[in-house]
Image (spheres, helix red, strand yellow):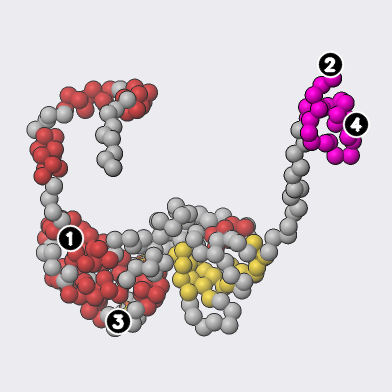
């Protein structure tokens, strides 16, 4: 019996298609053609490099042959380690951004700032009060704010930075905590501030004060802490500490998981 013919023809050899290899299905695909990448020129540490136009600044630095040992962490816009300043041709402004999420532009003249010097006093949170006095004592320079809004414009997180400094000036800790909540501590606001304020450390102080004095207490957490202190789980901890990694993994994956409520 002759093999069943396929409906599709093999290109350039219909005889072969029907008689010799009839079950071969030929899928016609577009052959990818190597399209030359669009390149742009960026200046890294004062030297010009051609880099792909779709690169992030971080990608461009690495494409140019540099190994980034400082000034990179998450590479996803979360850790704030890759603060960068740049200028563009024919533009007097200094721009700021995160190297891992900002795309290059032709003629970009850039410099990474892996560490930004910042004033950071040491304090004992137990000795502070959750009001304006904490800011007066530790960050008196905030009262020099001239409300220029440069800090807000410099922030890669689009935070209302000036507003949280103004809230600190009023002693509104909850507002400072709230407005600075997504701060990455990249430091770009503070390098641009004419009053030399270290905004992110002000935000951290507010978060600590809020957590220590103002956040509503959870009764469930208090109860669990009492149970831990009373030794209720000591035996269980001892048992866990003796287990191997494999036993712990097995136990972990077999645990009861509360179903999510719709
Ligand atoms: S507030 Fe300042 S330190 Fe925080 S993310 Fe914005 S620019 Fe960076
Ligand atoms: S850059 Fe400095 S002076 Fe200007 S608004 Fe921000 S905190 Fe105030
Ligand atoms: S490397 Fe973490 S924000 Fe850029």
Callout 2: SS: loop
Nearer mark to the viewer, of 4 and 1: 4
Q: Foreground residue, 12 or 66?
A: 12
Q: Quadrant of residue 172?
A: bottom left
The residue range painted magenta reads 1-24
Tag 2: Cα neighbours inside 10 Å, few (<14), some, or many (≥20)? few
* 3D distance between C-alphas at marks 1 and 2: 87 Å
User: In the rendered structure, which disc, 4 or 1, sits on the residue that comes first in sequence?
Assistant: 4
Callout 3: SS: loop
Residue matched to label 4: 15
Marking on residue 134: none
* 3D distance between C-alphas at marks 4 and 3: 82 Å
User: In the rendered structure, which disc, 3 or 2, sits on the residue that comes first in sequence?
Assistant: 2
Residue matched to label 2: 1
Q: Quadrant of residue 23?
A: top right
User: In the rendered structure, which disc, 4 or 2, sits on the residue that comes first in sequence?
Assistant: 2
Callout 1: SS: helix
Question: Could one spot residue 43 in this view of the protein?
Answer: no
Residue matched to label 3: 147
Ligand 1 within 8 angstroms of badge 1 C-beta:
no
Q: 143 above or below 187?
A: below
Q: Foreground residue, 133 or 93?
A: 93
């Amino acid at each position: 019996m002759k093999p069943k013919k396929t409906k599709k023809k093999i290109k350039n050899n219909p005889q072969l298609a029907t008689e010799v290899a009839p079950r071969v299905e030929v899928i016609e695909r577009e052959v990818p053609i190597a399209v030359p990448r669009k390149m742009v020129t960026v200046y890294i540490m004062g030297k010009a490099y051609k880099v792909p136009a779709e690169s992030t600044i971080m990608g461009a630095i690495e494409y140019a042959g540099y190994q980034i040992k400082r000034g990179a962490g998450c590479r996803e816009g979360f850790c704030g380690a890759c603060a960068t300043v740049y200028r563009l041709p024919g533009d007097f402004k200094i721009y700021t951004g995160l190297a891992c999420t900002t795309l290059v532009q032709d003629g970009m003249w850039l410099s990474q700032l892996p560490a930004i010097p910042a004033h950071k006093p040491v304090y004992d949170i137990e000795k502070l009060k959750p009001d304006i006095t904490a800011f007066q004592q530790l960050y008196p320079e905030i009262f020099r704010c001239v409300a220029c809004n440069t800090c807000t414009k410099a922030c890669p997180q689009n935070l209302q930075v000036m507003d949280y400094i103004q809230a600190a000036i009023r002693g509104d800790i909850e507002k400072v905590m709230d407005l600075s909540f997504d701060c990455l501590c990249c430091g770009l606001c503070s390098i641009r501030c004419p009053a030399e304020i270290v905004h992110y450390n002000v935000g951290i102080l507010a978060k600590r004060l809020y957590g220590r004095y103002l956040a509503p207490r959870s009764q469930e957490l208090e109860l669990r802490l009492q149970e831990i202190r009373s030794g209720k789980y000591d035996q269980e901890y001892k048992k866990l500490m003796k287990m191997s990694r494999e036993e712990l993994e097995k136990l972990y994956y077999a645990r009861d998981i509360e179903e999510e409520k719709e």
